[in-house]
Amino acid sequence: MTNRPIQNDVSEIQITSLSHIHGQPQVIELLKVTVQGHFNMRAARPDSTSCPGPFLFTGPAGSGKTMTAKALHAELGNLTLVMTNGEAMNNKAELYSVLINADENTTIFIDEAHGMKTQTQDILQIAISERCITVPGHAYQHTIPLRNFTLILATTHEYRLRPALRSRMRIPCRFTYYTVDNLVKIVQQWMTAWNWKCQSEDIPNIIAQRAKGTPRLAIDTNLRACWTVAQSNDHNIITMADVQQAFGLLQIDEAGLDVTERSYLRLIFECGPIFPGVLSAKLGLPLQDIQWVIEPYLFHAGFITKERVSLRILTDKGKKHIENTSYP
């Protein structure tokens, strides 16, 4: 990994190889094989302009999809990386501009691809299957041929993409939550890149344990908060006291849960099995936020379960956590 000055966000760090990515071994191996196969084909057919992919990255928010896309772009040796998102691509001028200007040395990365409207997805589907777009005119339509760019779609909601588009994403890469051991390696990796030091070997482990299985929380939230507190206390290294103060200020507990997530669990603890709509009303949050933001990790970590009628139920692990946590 290339050392660079401290950035504001982990996604701004320059990633130069898939080998820099810790965790997601199945995804990384699939991408390495794909890249090697692409280069072998290009060596056998130097006149070929084909590109690998298209790729579909799916998985929880913060699980490294953007970072991996940057690493894949670097591995392919493409000259131009176009980074956009699904909502922006709903602007036809933006969509057409991105597609028409892309060539064989371009990687197009569309994050939050589920934000694309149906019409946008249809245009993109035709673009990757027929390598052309049709632009309506006053008298007749114009068909514009496209070159063979590399396309990467990333989404936390795979099945909000239209089946026709999803089926044309030739290389599906499904990201999962990271193990604590892999997150510890990632924390140590970025501390080395930023030349940050800590007082105890236990500190990266504590930071990783409170990251809910995602590198973004481990680095952007937890590690940076600990370093900020250390700096405010005039320390050149992160001490255990800095770590405890940082997590106290963030109100992130030993399992990585924040105030809202604990409030969610406490409501079920106090009221018993409860419908998500009632949880939404009591917490004052949209139902969509409850189901898409709060619940996925709580289900994954085994704090909650549900019955056939969708009643949310606290597991023994969830009850124990609420009973033993020292945070509000």
Image (tube, rainbow, N blue to C red):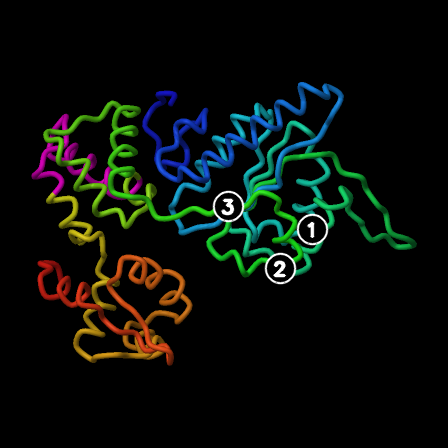
Which residues are drawn in magenta?
220-243
Q: Nearer the viewer, residue 47 or 225?
A: 47
Q: Position of residue 193 (x, y in %)?
A: 30, 24
| Residue in view at x 35 percent, y 31 percent | 7
What residue would you read off at disc 1? Answer: 125
Q: Residues within 10 Å of mark 2 (few under 14, many from 20)?
A: some
What residue would you read off at disc 2? Answer: 162
Determine which of the numbered discs, if any, sits on residue 286 in the image: none
Q: Is residue 63 left or right of residue 94?
A: left
The residue tagged with tag 1: helix, strand or loop? helix
Find the residue positioned furthest to the right: 139
How many angstroms separate mark 3 from mark 2 (CA)? Answer: 15 Å
Q: Are marks 1 and 2 in contact (CB under 8 Å)?
A: yes
How many angstroms separate mark 1 from mark 2 (CA)? Answer: 9 Å
Q: Position of residue 175 (x, y in %)?
A: 43, 46
Q: Main secondary structure of the magenta part?
A: helix
Callout 3 amino acid? Phe
